Image (cartoon, grey):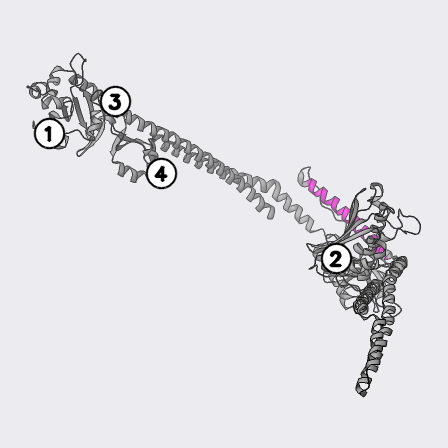
Amino acid sequence: MAIGRRALVVVTFVMVGGLALSTWASIALLREFAAVEGHAARRNASRAANALHTELASMAALAKDYATWDETVNVATGHPGDYAVEDLPPSAVANLELDLVWIGDRQLRLRLGVTREQADGTRPPFPAWLRQLPGDRARWQQHTANGLRGVVATPQGPLLLAALPIRQSSGDGPSHGLFVVGRFLNSAVLAKLSAATQLRLELWSPDRAAQRLGPHLARALEAGQAVTTVDRQQSYGWQLVHDPFEQTIAAIRAAEDRTVYQQGVRAVAWQCVNTGGLGALLMLALIGLLHRLVLRPVASLRDEVRRIDGSDERRLPVQGDDEIAEVACAVNELLDQLEFSRWTSARLEEAKLETLDAVSAVYLALDADDRLVEWTADSQLLCAVPLAAGLDLWELPFGWKLELLSDAVEACRSRGEAVSIDELPIRRDDGNLVLHLVVAPVRDTDLVVLLGQDVTAQTALQRQLLQASRLESIGQLAAGIAHEINTPTQYVGDNVRFLGESFDDVNDVLRAFERLHQTVAAGDDPQEAMQAADQAVQRADLEFLREDIPNAIGQTMEGVSRIATIVKAMKEFAHPGGAAKSPTDLNHLLENTLTVARNEWKYVAEVTCEYEPDLPAVPALPAELNQVFLNLIVNAAQAIGDRVDGSGAKGQIKIATRRVGEQAEVEISDTGGGIPPDIQARVFDPFFTTKEVGRGTGQGLAISRSVVVDKHAGSIDFRTTPDVGTTFVIRLPLAETPATAEIAA
């Protein structure tokens, strides 16, 4: 059974956790034992070094007795006498446990050298390498006054050496030389030191010690630290031995049995065995108890639950007052609630069907495969075939634009949020409809619902309102546009009249020269004809005509071009456009709007334009954006006009376009009086205006916001500072989205 396996896993985890905790504690304890051993090993290394220093001190005390003896002074000054026979024979050197005695004068020249007598009575010759003291002679010379002691390296191995200055027995006077005693640091000496320290001492060469310790410990040892190593049976403390001149001679190793650590390991192992055995017994007992008190009653309860099929009023038997009995009571209560829920669900289903039949809206519920689940009666009116559960939505002849609806459904499923289609056209034989459709997911299910409302009348009314606003704007601008066209028309007319009059004069000159040509061709006297030609030229004033006719023609062309520009801009502005979006050049739209509204701003403001030349085309409705830009530019001109108020001064209107991420941004700034703080929250409200009757209807900014936000999925906002000016910022997406896709008429 699953609960039994889980209980077993839980108990096992608890036991394993206990064992792991016990093991961790044991490891921590063993680490503490190892730390204590390491400390003891370092202390042993220090004890070995101290024993070595004690041995050197003993030799120095012995050397001092001989160094302050008058007979020794005689030897150092070149009068040895029978000193080597009576006072310091080889047998005496052996009795003193010395290996050699070296006596030198002030210049450290050997005056007497005595070696130790062997057990067979022989005396080895004094070593040739000891004719002079080992090491730097100059450094020895520095110690003739005070002496020194230490270990020095010799060809025969490390030598314990104590050197004392030779003086008179009174201890006064200068040093006459050095009295040096030496003892080789051999196995016998190490055995003596081991007995004194109760440690096993070994002497290692520096290279051999470095190989044994490894680079890390070798560097620590060279730095003067005592280091430790261990193996399975013993722990070792290491200490370097230096000569009196701080040169490394050897490494001494102190070994000690790992008795405490091994006893700790055995105790920890025994504890782990006891803990594991006790834990296994406890786990078996817990499993048996769990099976008897929990698993068996739960299995019985499970069998009873399986016998209940929900179609009758059977309930679980309740026995006892333990948790199992409480579970049985809870299951019985749940069965009662389930029965009540079934009854309620049946009533709600009936009420839902009645509601769907009564709702006057388009409602379609789709499953994960976009097949019908539910629908309303109004939905049936849109389809030419009867609706039925399981039908594929995309195969039904609803008459709507499938691409737009498919994108909305896909976006709803992928994002998990509602997607709105403001205007979804429906083609019908009895007339087209426009739906406002919302595609929304149903929480915690794979269902998607399509909820639509007929907005055909509202859409038509909105378009009529927009067209009326555009016509109103055109009507308000008509006088200004007429004035803009009249000015170039006047000087075009004046120039054309001037050209007509000039042509008459030029024509008279041409006739005079034609008669002169005929007279010359006939061979008659040309004098009279030439006088007539001269008089015609003087009357026409050809020099004046040569200068003014080109100017008149240029001015005429400029006037015609200006008229053509105004007419073209007016034509594009007044074009009703279509319902489908098209790639639109915002810079061109702004230029046309400035041209159309020129008479509104040219008397009160200077206009500067900062267009981004590479601004991408925006999918938009050009005619409606024209209206937005016109509203903002006219508002800016009127705000500046109210501020300058006939003073003759001019304000500033600045228009800029740029790309910001995946949006195109248009900024229209003015230096008017700004928007008061108390009305800033209402500027986009329909029919709200601060202008007098005849100048504003309160629809301009409301329509602008509807066009930008609702039809282009963009944003419109403003920044304003009282007595400084206002900047309106429009942002339009550069890419089409399902919610703002083009809508076919």
The amino acid pointed to by label 3 is: Thr
Residue found farthest to the top: 170
For the residues labelled 2 and 3, say whether their Cβ atoms are less than 8 Å apart: no
> Which amino acid type is shown beneath numbered disc 2?
Leu
Q: Label 2's element? A: loop
Mark 1 is surrounded, within 10 Å at the Cα level, by few (under 14), some (14 to 19) or many (20 or more) other residues, namely: some
3D distance between C-alphas at marks 4 and 2: 70 Å
Which residue is at the far right?
Answer: 693
Q: Find the distance from the CA under tag 3 to the CA under tag 4.
A: 30 Å
Q: Residue type at mark 4? A: His
Residue 601 % position (x, y): 83, 53
The answer to which image quadrant residue 551 occupies is bottom right
How far apart, in angstroms, are the residues tagged by discs 4 and 1? 42 Å
Spatial separation of the CA atoms under disc 2 and disc 3: 96 Å
Q: Nearer the viewer, mark 4 or mark 2?
A: 4
Q: Indicate which disc, 3 or 4, sits on the residue closer to the N terminus.
A: 3
* Residue appearing at x 28%, y 28% in the figure: 199
Mark linked to residue 216: 4
Q: Quadrant of the C terminus?
A: bottom right
The mark that comes first in sequence, 2 or 1, is: 1
Circle 3 residue: 54
Q: Which residue is mark 1?
A: 126
